[in-house]
Image (tube, rainbow, N blue to C red):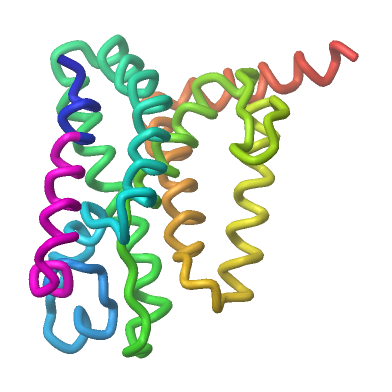
Amino acid sequence: MAVTYIIIAFTCIISFIGFNDRHLFIKLKHWPYEEQRKGEHYRWLTGGLLHANPMHLIFNMLTLYFFGLKVESWFRMTFADMGVTLYVLFYLAAIVAASSATYFKFRNSPGFASIGASGAVAAVLFAAILLDPMSEIMFIFLPIPIRAFIFGALYLWYSAYEAKQGGDNIDHTAHYYGALFGFFFPIVLSPGLAISFLNQINAWIHSF
């Protein structure tokens, strides 16, 4: 069984428990101010298992389903017996990387808290973009396919812009740094991916 399915199932279980247990929800959510004040850095990980509501959960898990299987397959094929372990490590580290970014930004802001797997899902998405930049991705509300690397550039621009603007209760900082982590983590493990990525884009540009 693909470990992506297990991650999805586990995230759904914890999220549904959180929907019905407010005390646990508050205890596990990513809350930088409390993490600094009480040293509760476990929230960097547990916050990525909670979601605000079923639609928030479904959106993230569908994205993980569509792109996670592809990324998991690459880990399995590239690293054989170590592939599954590295993939799980990649996913968990992506949650922590995204959460740590918002921690350093909001640790003195008692009113800020964040939940959701979006940072890790962004990491998986950008790993998939790295592996196949010429694939096509569509926006949910704008069903026009665009090349994955162009989508990625727009995603980073939008996340950076909205993170700077603030005020919409969405953790764009986690999205931005999760995406960057997801792009560069596989390159650290397999540097040739960077060359392949650039070569594919270069070939596409010169095809016009």
Q: Which residue is at a point 33% across and 38% down the rendered structure image? A: 61
On screen, residue 91 above or below 25: above
Considering only vertical position in the picture, is 31 above or below 121? below
Seen at 42% across and 26% down, the residue is 67
Q: Position of residue 125 (x, y in %)?
A: 46, 35
Direction right: furthest residue:
208
User: x%, y% of residue 62?
Assistant: 38, 33
Tell me, yes or no, whether the highlighted magenta stretch contains residue 19.
Answer: yes
- In this rendering, the answer to whether 103 lies above or below 44 is below
Q: Could you say where residue 87 lies in the image, as x and y percent from the top left? A: 24, 29
Q: Quadrant of residue 21?
A: bottom left
The N terminus sits in image quarter: top left
How many numbered tags mark residues here?
A: 0
Q: Is residue 14 above or below residue 73?
A: below
Queried whether the magenta region covers residue 173, the answer comes back as no
Identify which residue is drawn at 28% across, 56% down: 51
The residue at 42%/77% (across/down) is 105
Nearer to the camera, 193 or 71: 71
Left or right, residue 67 beside residue 77: right
By secondary structure, the bulk of the magenta-drawn segment is best described as helix
Range of magenta residues = 9-26
Q: Quadrant of residue 201?
A: top right
**Residue 208 picture quarter:** top right
Q: As drawn, is 63 to the left or to the right of 202?
A: left
Residue 33, percent across and down?
Answer: 27, 85
